[in-house]
């Protein structure tokens, strides 16, 4: 069978062949649960398939964990904490985290390829993600000594504050940045002295499993445990478990609210990084060409499947025409296709379910009178027909209270609004339930500062987007979450403060 058309173009079979060959090299040997340092079948013996969103083919069958498996994992974590991990020094934890970072760097291309196969993100984006994974473990290796407590002394009084780990923490991660989100959770938890039970998203479990294969001999048994499975079968019992004293979750706001309700049963502490509907504010002095680059990155990176994606554009009317013209050209000029190919700009969405969700919002936008400046459909390429593709889309003309504007689409869809009155624009920019991120494009530092302070969000970019530096806390306002990640402050969310007062008289 020919894998290319007569003119040498890609065919569906050529893409499938490329992906099968790559999968043979990188799909992990173990697709079971990882509990107590051992690979174990689910108690039920059941498995589920994880699919390649580019081709629709099965990549692997993975253990379908449930409540009994969560119980085993929590028990293994507690045993590891009581018997060994609670006695490790900061220097020992630092050495382990540093070695994990080294291992990730050694296996960067393999992990990136696996992430691309299971998630659909482009290989370039996956490489950046894996670099960030190593960076997280290395950063928190260095941060292990940064939150050791403090003392208070004055005449007749001596007191000290001790930071103590929770012991066992439960962590639930999403499908859009599987390995990166695992590092955001595991690195600070381990640095603070906790043991973990991690539940990956059912859509994308493979990179986390391969990661555990790579660091199995580095991490003591039971310190990290992974239960794969569906949210209602594995995530729900983990969030309710009385043996878990801290929960960290990244995902949708709706699920985050359920996590909080579950955690309330045992008064379990929570950190939540939830949804976003982030505004991009473009001022009249912005350079159109530079603005187009920032805006395109903000919304089209990772196929728009980013909590912090800049999905609402507020562009000053003085520069609206050249910027929108540039954005239309950028959207239409992007290569949508096989994410394993270096020239691809936009890969598939993670699943057909997510495609259908995006399309429902686009259909609602059409019914709401929107004008589609670009995209709004699947690519017209038979070679991609078996995958989960949506073209980069620009929409204008919606009322700001329309559901497509107010709710998180989680796809490559940008809604455009023109403005000339700053106060009116800012009122709209903040008129959503979310407050995860925002952005400003201007060459005026005073305007940049004013706008950054006026946007109700936890992370603001000026003339850039998606770049995150370890040390700058990341998290949301309003319904975008509770707590902060990526910084030394994160260790405060993985420890408890204990005060000790000495009687000196």
Image (cartoon, grey):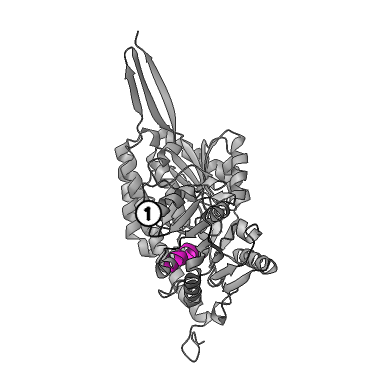
**Residue 82 in the image: x percent, y percent?**
43, 33
> Residue at the location (38% across, 63% down)?
127
Whether residue 104 is visible? yes
Range of residues picked out in magenta: 292-303
Q: Please state which of residues 184 and 445 is positioned toward the viewer in this rendering.
A: 445
Q: Residue furthest top?
A: 505
**Callout 1 crowding tier (Cα within 10 Å): few <14, some 14–19, many ≥20:** few
* Residue of label 1: 445
**Residue 445 in the image: x percent, y percent?**
37, 54
Is residue 297 covered in magenta?
yes
**Residue 248 in the image: x percent, y percent?**
51, 44
**Residue 301 in the image: x percent, y percent?**
47, 65
Q: Is residue 237 left or right of residue 4?
A: right
Above or below, 157 against 193 in this view is above
Secondary structure of residue under mark 1? helix
Q: Residue furthest right?
A: 367
Above or below, 328 against 453 in this view is below
> Residue at the location (52% across, 57% down)?
279
């Amino acid at each position: 069978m020919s894998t290319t058309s007569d003119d040498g173009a890609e065919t569906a079979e050529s893409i499938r062949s490329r992906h099968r060959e790559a999968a043979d090299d990188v799909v992990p040997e173990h697709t079971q649960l990882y509990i107590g340092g051992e690979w174990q079948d689910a108690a039920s013996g059941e498995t589920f398939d994880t699919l390649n969103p580019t081709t629709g083919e099965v990549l692997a069958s993975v253990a379908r964990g449930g409540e009994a498996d969560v119980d085993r994992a929590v028990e293994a974590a507690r045993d590891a904490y009581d018997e060994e991990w609670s006695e490790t020094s900061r220097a020992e934890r630092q050495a382990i985290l540093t070695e994990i970072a080294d291992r990730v760097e050694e296996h960067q291309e393999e992990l990136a390829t696996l992430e691309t196969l299971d998630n659909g993100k482009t290989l370039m984006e996956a490489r950046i993600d894996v670099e960030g994974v190593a960076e997280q473990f290395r950063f928190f290796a260095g941060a292990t000594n940064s939150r050791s407590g403090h003392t208070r002394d004055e005449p007749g009084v001596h007191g000290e504050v001790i930071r103590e780990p929770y012991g066992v923490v439960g962590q639930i991660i999403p499908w859009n940045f599987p390995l990166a989100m695992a590092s955001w959770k595991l690195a600070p938890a381990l640095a603070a002295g906790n043991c973990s039970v991690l539940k990956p998203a059912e859509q994308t479990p493979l990179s986390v499993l391969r990661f555990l294969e790579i660091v199995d001999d580095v991490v003591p048994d039971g310190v990290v445990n992974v239960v794969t499975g569906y949210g209602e079968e594995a995530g729900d019992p983990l969030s309710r478990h009385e043996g878990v004293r801290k929960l960290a979750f990244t995902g949708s706001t709706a699920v985050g609210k359920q996590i909080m309700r579950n955690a309330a049963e045992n008064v379990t502490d929570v950190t939540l990084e939830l949804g976003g509907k982030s505004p991009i504010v473009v001022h009249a002095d912005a350079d159109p060409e530079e603005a187009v680059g920032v805006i395109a990155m903000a919304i089209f990176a990772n196929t728009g499947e980013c909590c912090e994606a800049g999905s609402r554009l507020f562009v000053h009317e003085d520069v609206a025409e050249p910027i929108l013209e540039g954005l239309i050209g950028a959207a239409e000029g992007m290569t949508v296709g096989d994410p394993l190919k270096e020239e691809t700009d936009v890969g598939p969405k993670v699943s057909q379910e997510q495609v259908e969700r995006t399309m429902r919002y686009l259909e609602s936008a059409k019914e709401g009178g929107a004008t589609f400046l670009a995209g709004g459909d699947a690519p017209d390429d038979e070679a991609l027909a078996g995958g989960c593709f949506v073209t980069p889309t620009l929409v204008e003309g919606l009322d700001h209270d329309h559901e497509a504007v107010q709710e998180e689409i989680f796809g490559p869809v940008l809604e455009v609004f023109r403005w000339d009155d700053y106060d009116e624009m800012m009122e709209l920019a903040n008129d959503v339930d979310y407050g995860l991120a925002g952005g400003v494009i201007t060459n005026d530092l005073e305007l940049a500062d004013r706008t950054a302070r006026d946007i109700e969000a936890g992370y603001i970019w000026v003339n850039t987007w998606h770049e995150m530096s370890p040390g700058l806390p990341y998290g949301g306002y309003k319904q975008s979450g509770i707590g902060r990640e990526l910084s030394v402050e994160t260790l405060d969310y993985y420890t408890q403060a204990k005060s000790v007062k000495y009687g000196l008289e």
